[in-house]
Amino acid sequence: MSGPRVLVITAMRDEGPHLLEWLAHHRAAGVQDFLVVSNECTDGTDTLLDLLEAAGIVTHLRNEIPEGRTPQWAALRLAAAHPLTRAADWIAMLDCDEFINLRAPLRSVQDLIAAAGDADAIALSWRLFGHSGHVRRPDAPTTEAYHRAIPPD
């Protein structure tokens, strides 16, 4: 994919069941680099991230949280010092339950950046999706299981 180099930075804990869908979604949208900072995983997310890093799909950092700090801020400090952060043209900070949703005619994050012209930043609105009637997390991709949301406009 040509155009600006886009990095997504995220902090994760126990997101294993959702991780591959989230990565695939954003890779298809044109994100080239993922810097994933994990902390205190008990579900194997950190092991999966190590395997994804070995395959060249993500860069994985383990977050040892200093006393009195929150995981998110400690992750941001790690990410700020990482070479990928300095090499990126654009950076998005996302959680594993947040999906960039592009509308036609935009097909990639590079298209979105081009449409923004000389902007230094792009604000993405947040759309609230509820539980979609589920009492427990269904065994289905996030984008299929959770489809009820507040109106888009």
Image (cartoon, rainbow, N blue to C red):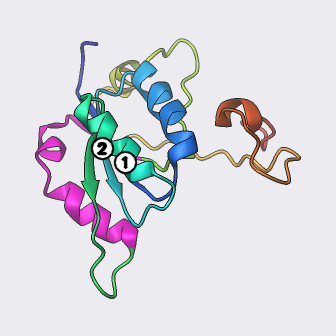
Element under disc 1: helix
User: Can you name the residue that lies furthest to the bottom here?
Assistant: 68
Magenta segment boundaries in residue numbering? 71-93
Q: Is residue 16 above or below residue 78?
A: above
- In this view of the protein, can residue 101 be seen by the observer? yes
Foreground pick, 138 / 126: 138
**Category of crowding for the residue at label 2, using alpha-carbon neighbours closer than 10 angstroms: few (below 14), some (14–19), many (at least 20):** some
The reply to whether discs 2 and 1 touch (Cβ–Cβ < 8 Å) is yes
For image coordinates 54% across by 24% down, the residue present is 102
Q: Position of residue 35 (x, y in %)?
A: 28, 45
Q: Position of residue 13 (x, y in %)?
A: 46, 59
For image coordinates 27% across by 71% down, the residue present is 64
Image quadrant in which the N terminus is located: top left
Q: Amino acid at mark 2?
A: Asp
Measure the alpha-carbon separation of dots 2 and 1: 5 Å
Element under disc 2: helix
**Category of crowding for the residue at label 1, using alpha-carbon neighbours closer than 10 angstroms: few (below 14), some (14–19), many (at least 20):** some
- Where, by quadrant of the figure, is residue 71 drawn? bottom left
Residue 23 appears left or right of 142: left
Q: Which mark is residue 125?
A: none
Circle 1 residue: 47
Circle 2 residue: 50
For image coordinates 73% across by 46% down, the residue present is 129
Q: Main secondary structure of the magenta part?
A: helix
For image coordinates 44% across by 47% down, the residue present is 94
- In this view of the protein, can residue 98 be seen by the observer? no
Q: Is residue 127 above or below residue 117?
A: below
Image quadrant in which the C terminus is located: top right
Q: Position of residue 6 (x, y in %)?
A: 28, 32
